[in-house]
Image: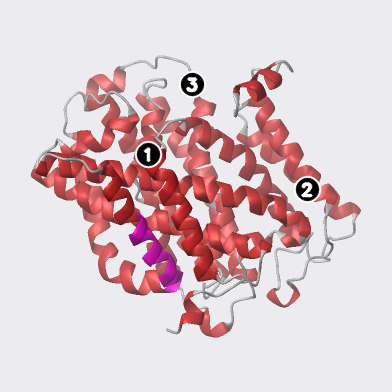
Amino acid sequence: MNERATSWGIEPVPERLRVLTGLDLGLLWGNLGVSLLVVVAGAILVPALSLPAALTAILIGCLIGNLMLAVAGAIGAQARVPAMVVLRRPLGERGSYLPTAVNVVQCLGWTVFELLVIATAAAALSDELFGFEARWAWTLAFGAAALALGLLGPIGIVRSVLRRVAIWVVPLVVAYLAWWALTGGGLEDAWSRPGEGGLSLWQGIDIVVGVTVSWVPLAADYTRFARTPRGAFWGTGVGYFVPDAMLLGLGAVVLLTRDVADAAALPAAIAAGGLVALVALFALTAAETDEAFANAYSGAVSLQNLVPRAPQRALVMLTTTIGTAGALVLKLTSFQSFLFLLGSCFVPLFAVLLADWLAAGCRYDPSDGRARTSVNGGAVAAWVAGFAVYQWLSPTGPAWWVEQVERLDPPDWQIGATLPSFGVAFVLALGVAVATGHVHRGAVRA
């Protein structure tokens, strides 16, 4: 594979590079779903929610989030361009710059979080085995590994890593962690233990959706190389759903049955589980590197929507370096607020994309990849309105922002913020498409 193939820019992917099957994408997204951060996110749900309520939130949230992810993947396979370039269709070329900036920030944030949790797990391993942590050294080492993967590119990752190694290692690791979590004793007590409050069922669903929906503005970066939209839909949706639901559930069970004080202490708790647990944690830590790669890579690809002529490999180096530096100086805090914030940004953004795609007759032709206008103000307004509804129902951000929003006396609805935010943005965006005459004649039939 030549260098150009590994760093394809923002132009539609040619037929010769549309090589990823549904199984390939299932392997890719399945591996991206195997993450200690997903386990940590599941642990956030308890003990505020009871274990049955947490598992219900996980199931519903995974179904909602992964359906969004699967559709975004299929749209990307049709358009054959990166996710932020796809957004030029509903928002206009310059209109796509704002979500691009937001997505770059979230990619850098996830890169920091991923490297933090990887380095924390590796430090727990080295402390258990050798008596020292050296978290800074592990951060640098895995930052370098993420950079190497980013330069390899999605096709190279699937062919060189996933098909040869991850397809065998990851299922064994997940199976062991499931056994370790479920045989620690106290499962019956954990099941009957009531929730302590502070988090509603629908807020729990919002957290779970936030975990998955953060991948929606990245999906097309990988599915643009898919052979068919159908393969992209099923490979992306099913591939991520299985580990996503399993590890979220394991996170909730582990926190309740293994006497873990908080979510950030999970890696050390796993490391203390014996030799086999150490091996499993080592394998999971190594497998986690591809999440850091994916966010650094997509951050670079998103930047190309702003600076198309910038070399992608240089941008990958830039985003990985920033993420590694952030992981050296920051701590794993405010993770729950980060997930709510992601939901408020990307749930309504997907709603706008979906409405425009449906209005286009469920078809984005790669030969017509030009934006209709510089800025589609109506579609941008629909996204902002959805964001405002989400924040109104679940304010997240700096203290001053939360205080100002709470003065608006938001209603105590029992349906969370995801569905109202999506509904408002979708209806408004669809109305904009109709009003501006951007409805394809086959849209009604579709």
Q: Nearer the viewer, mark 2 or mark 1?
A: 2
Q: Amino acid at mark 3?
A: Leu
Q: Amino acid at mark 1?
A: Leu
* Quadrant of the snapshot with the C terminus: bottom right
Question: Residue 273 sits in which quadrant?
Answer: top left
Seen in the picture, residue 381 relative to 222 is either above or below; the reply is: above
Q: Give percent across and percent down for residue 407.
A: 72, 15
Q: Label 1 belongs to which residue?
A: 248
Q: On residue 302, which mark appears?
A: none
Q: Is residue 214 visible?
A: no
Q: Which residues are magenta?
A: 143-155
Kindly identify the residue that appears in the image at 45 percent across and 15 percent down. Answer: 197
Are the residues at dot 2 and dot 3 in contact (C-beta closer than 8 Å)?
Answer: no
Element on which disc 2 rests: helix
Kindly identify the residue that appears in the image at 64 percent across and 41 percent down. Answer: 345
Q: Earlier in the sequence, mark 2 or mark 1?
A: 1
Q: Is residue 166 visible?
A: yes
Element on which disc 3 rests: loop
Q: Give percent across and percent down for residue 230.
A: 54, 67
Q: Earlier in the sequence, mark 1 or mark 3?
A: 3
**249 with respect to 362 (left or right):** left
Q: Label 3 belongs to which residue?
A: 199
Kindly identify the residue that appears in the image at 60 percent across and 65 percent down. Answer: 82
Question: Is residue 47 covered in magenta?
Answer: no
Magenta span: chief secondary structure: helix
What is the C-alpha distance between the residues marked 2 and 3?
Answer: 31 Å
Q: Give percent across and percent down for residue 107.
A: 52, 51
Q: Label 2 belongs to which residue?
A: 380
Q: Nearer the viewer, residue 355 or 328?
A: 328
Q: How many numbered circles are shown?
A: 3
Circle 3 crowding by C-alpha within 10 Å: few under 14, some 14–19, many from 20: some
